[in-house]
Image (cartoon, rainbow, N blue to C red):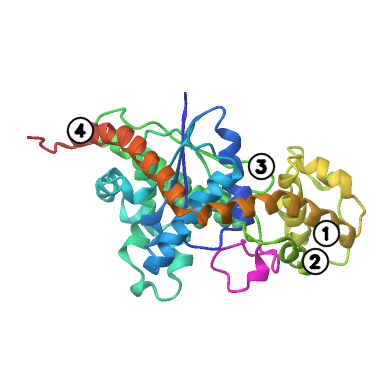
Amino acid sequence: MKRIFSGVQPTGNLHLGNYLGAIKNFVALQDDYDCIYCVVDMHAITLWQDPGALRANTREVAAAYLAAGVDPKRCIVFNQSQVPAHAQLAWIFNCVARLGWLNRMTQFKDKAGKNREKASVGLYAYPNLMAADILAYKATHVPVGQDQKQHLELARDIAQKFNNDYETELFPILEPLILGPAARVMSLRDGAKKMSKSEASDMSRINMTDGADDIAKKIRKATSDAELLPGPEALDENGAVPEETRQARPEAYNLLGIYAALSDKPLAEAMTEFAGSQFSHFKAVLTDLAVAALGPMGHEMKRLTGDPSSVDAVLRDGAERARAIAEPVLREVYDKVGFLRS
Ligand code: TYM
């Protein structure tokens, strides 16, 4: 069976973008693939994390996977730092990837901001660790939101360069799976900005643990425009929103995408339902849908985080199974590189 690897950083404030862009797809894919879902705590510390908060957030991401419906028997669920192969392979990739490649990474530029000299070396080398995450399992498919596309292209370049340099076919060519109508969920306050964990205003995002009242308030106050909602004739022949069309009404298309993803409908069908409607009517229906989808999941996340030993048991078992796959791959890599095993 083809293998999937994906991960989410335990940096707090898991939101609807993380759910619709990634976690919801993790659940759908577990029937057809051999799936490995990681809580990437080593990536999280590329920016400062309070140790106590990191522990809590690590359990919270694992709880989100489980509450969303990831089955820890069929899938491997673990946290990255429990499997040393990630760091070991990342070092080798630090020596394969070129500075010029990393210099092009837009996420580093965004996260480092103006004060680049003060950014951690880990933040810069972040995509190499991400490549190691995936390739330590020879995973071929990687479900992510749109914002991770550039990192996955780099991971593919690293795999190819390793294979070329060492004259091997050891690493497969990996493929991003950027799925569904909400692969890039935007801020509820500003349709030009991505919904993000680090945005100061909590009103900009719906958190996976928000209760019904918060969800309702955030959707009601979400930025909208003065026009009626567009119908499916606005879409191109592939059923996607042309970029110019989106830019003219980013908030409307964002909310329609969220509605389509939450209700498991193609965007065209969602748009047919609300063509010519007022925002107020649409927002009321969207609120009910979001509360119905997120409410039980948020409850289950809280129940699980209230029982940390059960979450830790899942992570421990997952780490053991992950090590059993990654260690032989790492041994193959070490042999190719010429590291002596005595
Ligand atoms: P992270 O923790 O920032 O986000 C986790 C997942 O959520 C997706 N996502 C979104 N999708 C749609 N709309 C949004 N507004 C939105 N915000 C976040 C992300 O695309 C991601 O799929 N580098 C990764 C974690 C990682 C990883 C990996 C992923 C580390 N190693 C290996 C795949 C494979 C990250 O920072 O995700």
Q: Nearer the viewer, residue 93 or 7?
A: 7
The label shown at residue 297 is none
CA gap, disc 3 to disc 1? 21 Å
Disc 4: which residue:
336
Q: Which residue is mark 3?
A: 180
Tell me if label 4 and label 3 are in contact, CB under 8 Å: no
Mark 1, Cα crowd under 10 Å, few <14 / some 14-19 / many 20+, is many
Q: CA distance from mark 1 to mark 4?
A: 57 Å
Q: Is residue 2 left or right of residue 275?
A: left
- What amino acid is at disc 3? Gly
Whichever of callouts 4 and 3 sits on the residue coming sooner in the sequence is 3
**Residue 203 is covered by the magenta coloring:** yes
What residue does disc 2 label? 220
The residues bearing labels 2 and 3 have C-alpha atoms spaced at a distance of: 24 Å
Report the side of 296 relative to 280 (left or right).
left
Distance Cα–Cα, label 4 vs label 3: 39 Å
* Helix, strand or loop at mark 2: helix
- Which residue corresponds to mark 1? 283
* Three-letter amino acid code at the position of disc 2: Arg
Report the span colored magenta.
Answer: 187-205
- Residue at 38% across / 72% down in the picture? 116
Would the CB of label 4 be found within 8 Å of ligand 1? no
Give the foreground label among 4 and 2.
2
Of labels 4 and 2, earlier in sequence is 2
Give the residue drawn at x 39%, y 40%.
318
In front: 316, or 272? 316
Image location of residue 163, percent across then percent down: 30, 33
Helix, strand or loop status at disc 4: helix
**Residue 151, visible in the rendered structure:** no
Type of amino acid at the residue the image marks with label 4: Lys
